[in-house]
Amino acid sequence: MSLTRKTVLATMLGAMFTLGACSDGKDGAQGPQGPEGPQGPEAPKPPLVITSAQAQVLEWTYGDGTVNVTFAIQNQDGENIETLDRVQLMSTVTDENGMLADTIDVTYQAGSDSSVGTLEHTGDGVYSLVVPQDGVTADSTGIGYVRPGWRSANDGVPRTKRIMFNDSDNLAKVQTTDDAKCVACHGEFDAASGNATWGWHQHHHALDNDQNVVVVEACLVCHTDVQKENGGWANNTMAMFGHGKKFDADNGMVSSGHSALWSNYSMDMKRCSTCHMDDVVFTATINGCATCHTNLQDPNNGLGVDHSGFTDANCTSCHNADGGFYYDHNNGKARDEALNRYSFDVLSVARSDDKANILVTVKAMDADGNAVDVTAIDPMDATPRGWATVMKNGEAMLPGRDAGHVARSTGVVAGSEADTYVYTIEHALPYMDGEVLLGGVDGRIFHNKDGASPRAPITVSNVKDVRRTSSDGLKCLNCHTEGLDGHGSQRGGFDLGGDACVQCHSAYNWEHDKQDKDHPMAWGPFVHNMHFGAYNEERDLGKMPTVDRNKKVECVACHTGDIDLANVAPALVLNGMDQDNVYGITPIAANCATCHTGAAAKAHMEQNGGDFNVAVTPAGTHMGESDSFNVFDPEPVVESCSVCHSPAKMAEYHNY
């Protein structure tokens, strides 16, 4: 439903008048007589206090060569502002192919020789803005926004947020990306200021008339569907940013942002619903396709067909839902099928009668809810394998099969109860009185049941029952949409997300990383360092797409909100390049130092009980699957950081 200017204005004014009415319908008591003063229109009015402002678009149209917008503006108390003398407008219209193409960015400013358009105050805080835009007519469609006010309140009315004007019918044609899916990775846009942590100019969002945040539509005003030739923001379309390719200073196409996620245990480049609306129907275009297939219009592109002279019309003739060459972007259906083919449930993790081994008892169901004989699963279809270890001081004890992993099963047999199956884990640590056991099943499911095709992870365990954490592994799936598909598609999945990783990314995992860098492999320090620290920079891999360690971070993007340093697991975080030089870092310091990397910050931690070089000696040896190696079991460490760094202060200083 669209509201006319008169309807919206009447509603706004009616609401204001209603606020001044008596709530019970009865006359109140007579108040005292006030002092005499000037009466009538000559009576002085107190100056309107304006500390902030908000606006609504009441009506907008395209005319012959003009954009016409009627809007209302009020101060922070809902009082009409009658002194506005500056407003910015951006407008983008669709071309003959229905693509957002031509953009203007103009500003009306009273008294300025460079001012564009006209601004008329019609009373009651309502203004009529008319600005020129070449080539538009009354039949044009497009999107845009107005932003009344000044950057600084010292210059006049403080400027409002960007307020969108749009045509909802037209918008359905031009926007295929879901705002909620942007927020899932980037955090709430209205919490951002400046170049926020989870995005570049994330503060460039807009509002609708109900003051709700508008993301993709606001981006499309500048980053349209059509590439320009003159550089700047117009040179890079929304599809280019979304798909992760943009022009560099030499006008060459380079990877940026989202493209880095394709190979990072994260996003399937063929799964459109990661970012797009689930039910959207795509139209193949040069702009959309060439943002990934950057050599598409090269006559020698190796595709077998010369696309160099093709237009959007050529694209749709072949790449459509009814024709051929549409299967490449089928929304990840094959992987979804693989992920759902088997559903495992861990029934128990317990010692064998002789205490020598750990037994993981499971059930499995297929996609139709039928029981699965786990012993008969074809390894060309799936490779589930049991695993287990002992929990100590809130962390998974390692080693198991080797120095940095849990112990793996040596076989699976039918259990004593119908449709149950038991994995036997032989190389776990010896029995400990009062021990807590962590165990489960992981492995691969192959898409095409050939043991070689792309694969999806199986991951299930009792981790949520035995390990306390302030993070939420399922929140990892907001960005890592492919089930945190890591380590050969054997870890992650949709059931646990990041919680699957703690079976090996434990405080007891002292081993160095694959690049021979001595970084903590424990889950907290490891994740903080990868996303916000220097982990990738030190590997010459550049920053992660979401990283800026000079900006504050919204912890609840990954955490539950229960961030209390008094609850940090007391296990000493181990590090080392080999088993002869293992050392420890106190657990809170290990986490904080991944972001707070400066010498002063580390000195502060050390002055308050943190230690980055705790001497650690072997507690014994353990026989894994192929070799014997040292076991480290240092005493737990409880730091007192929570005395000053309370949950309330943590929340205050770790928001945008």
Image: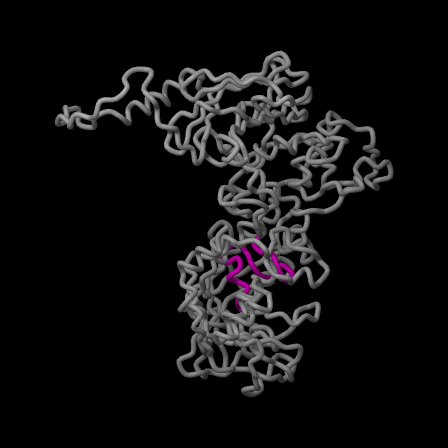
Magenta includes 493?
Answer: yes
Find the residue positioned furthest to the bottom.
620
The image shows residue 139 at horizontal and vertical percentages of 60, 14
Q: Is residue 244 left or right of residue 43?
A: right
Applied colour scheme: one colour
**Start-end of magenta stretch:** 483-505
| Residue 68 vs residue 86, the one in the foreground | 86
Instruction: Pinpoint residue 383: horizontal percent, then vertical percent.
Output: 60, 63
Q: Relative to residue 47, is residue 416 depicted above or below? A: below
Residue 450 vs 221, above or below: the answer is below
- The x and y percentages for residue 365 are 48, 56
Which residue is at the far right? Answer: 300
State the residue in front, 419 or 251: 251
Nearer-the-camera pick, 2 or 202: 202
Q: What residue is rendered at 56% in x and 22% in y?
A: 110
Residue 69, percent from left and from top: 53, 19
Could you tell me which quadrant the N terminus lies in? top left
In this view, the residue in front, 593 or 112, is 112
Q: Is residue 147 highlighted in magenta?
A: no
- Report the number of numbered marks: 0
Q: Is residue 528 visible?
A: yes
Instruction: Give the answer, above or below, for where 114 lies relative to 286.
Output: above
